[in-house]
Amino acid sequence: MIGARLRHAVGRETRGVDIVASLNLVGILLLALSPAFLVPTGVALGYREPPVPFLAAGAITAAAGLLLARATAGTRRVGIREGFLVVSLVWLLVPASGCLPYLLSGEKALASPLDAYFESMSGFTTTGSSVLSDAAVLNDSLAFWRQFTMWLGGIGIIVLALAVLPRLRVGGRQLFETEAPGPEVEPLTVTIRQTARRFLILYAGITFAAIVALVLVGVTGLDDEMGPYDAISHSLATVATGGFSPRTQGLVEFGAATHWVVLFFMVVSGTNFALMYVALARGGLRVFGRDEEFRLYLGLLGAASIVVVADLLRTSVAGGEEAVRHALFNVTSLMTTTGFATADFNEWGSLAVAVLVGVMFLGASAGSSSGSIKVVRHVIIWKMLRRELDQTVHPELVAPLRLNGRVVEERALRGVIVFVILYLGLVALGAMAVLADPASRALEIGAFDALAAAATTLGNVGPALGAAGPFGSYAHYGDGSKAVLTALMGLGRIEIIPVVVLLSRNYWRA
């Protein structure tokens, strides 16, 4: 787990960090990203829109990656120490490449480098927060690139690159473990290359299934608004647990059938991909029932939805099927950190809003594309609390903590506590930074709104409250707030620890 790897990195290694080897791998990963720009290029040609912004961005990314790789070429191997540095640098530089089409297109809404970087970071980190007051101002190819960045970020830039980089061997496994969402992902195969490939195949398969389902919703007349372009765009964001939409008001513009289909795929995408692979490989669903995290995941979704349904009925905001659908959809969207919305929950009762903000801190399963704390950490913390109570009554009691029948090391337990403390501390600091911004005072952003903004960006959730609510944006936030929230998105995506490790003096010592 993260805690164990962190201690191994800073306590057991005796050599220094090989910065040259790290930069060499960063260059290779940037080079591997460059072909992705051909996808929106094809969309631009299909819609007879200028492909130059994507071709130029791809060329710049390839040139930068090639130059960096050649300047640092050698036979050095990337280890665990270098892995932390590589992950941090990649998640700084990839959004920088991703924002180039926005800047080169001449789109006025994203003319500011900070705004373009915010939008790109939000896409690659699958956050879904936006500085666009109206996403419909983007042309079709630029809007598709915005959706596609989420799909790429969902599977992880590094995992995608590892599928075609056999040179990474031991270092590759460490990079995968560092970047993969959640505290631990069980290896599916012997080699990291095979593991990455199987994750990608499963991820692509779920995406294809979502596209087919949404296309069928449109062609069968269940929702006449759903065309092929919208089906592909929303499927990319759904499976990535992202939340971007090319529509002005997102999924509000679609009918109930679309909402139920997207809801189903949000639940699927919030499930541990390793768990899904094992279930498919063994041909049985019992593996889900035996998994403690998955059981709690569904239980929390159900319990939170019941409370929200009751509050919607109590306040007469909605009734019948509509109340159930809005409650289930928006609770699932925020808990899985997808960020779609079927209604403006700013206008809901205080209890419903409190539940929605609360589920932002839960997250979905480890090993999924979702963000936030993750359910497995809540499982572990609950077990630790229960054990502490038992040992208070019986001081002599020796009770190893087990997860799915397997003993969890004490070092890993400490790592979970450290992560949660850092996470909550960053939310608080982020909220204070937003409130300290003069632009925030001019907008009259309240403490709860600032807290929601920090929580939703660090948790890669998407919508916040107030002006940055489900149909709002961060367009009117100050540059200082945008910079802080952009940093929180990046920290949340790589789960904080790699950056904190870089700030340690022990990390840089030989």
Image: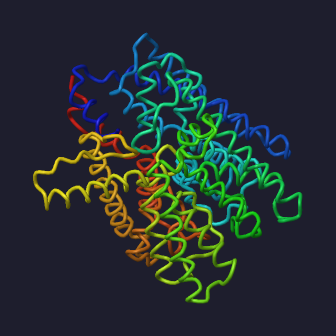
Instruction: State which quadrant residue 32 falls in.
Output: top right
174 sits to left or right of 303 = left
452 sits to left or right of 16 = right
Q: What residue is drawn where x is 59% and y is 73%?
A: 327
Question: Residue 74 in the image: x percent, y percent?
Answer: 44, 11
Question: Residue 125 in the image: x percent, y percent?
Answer: 52, 48
Q: What residue is drawn where x is 30% and y is 58%?
A: 425
The image shows residue 294, relative to residue 441, as above or below, that is: above
Question: Residue 438 in the image: x percent, y percent?
Answer: 39, 70
The image shows residue 188, relative to residue 207, as above or below, that is: above
Residue 249 appears in the figure: yes
The image shows residue 312, relative to residue 247, as above or below, that is: below
Q: What residue is drawn where x is 69% and y is 68%?
A: 249
104 sits to left or right of 171 = right
The residue sitting at the right extreme is 220
In this orientation, which residue lies closer to the viewer: 58 or 329? Answer: 329
The image shows residue 380, relative to residue 450, as above or below, that is: above
The residue sitting at the top extreme is 75
In this orientation, which residue lies closer to the viewer: 70 or 415? Answer: 415
Residue 137 appears in the figure: no
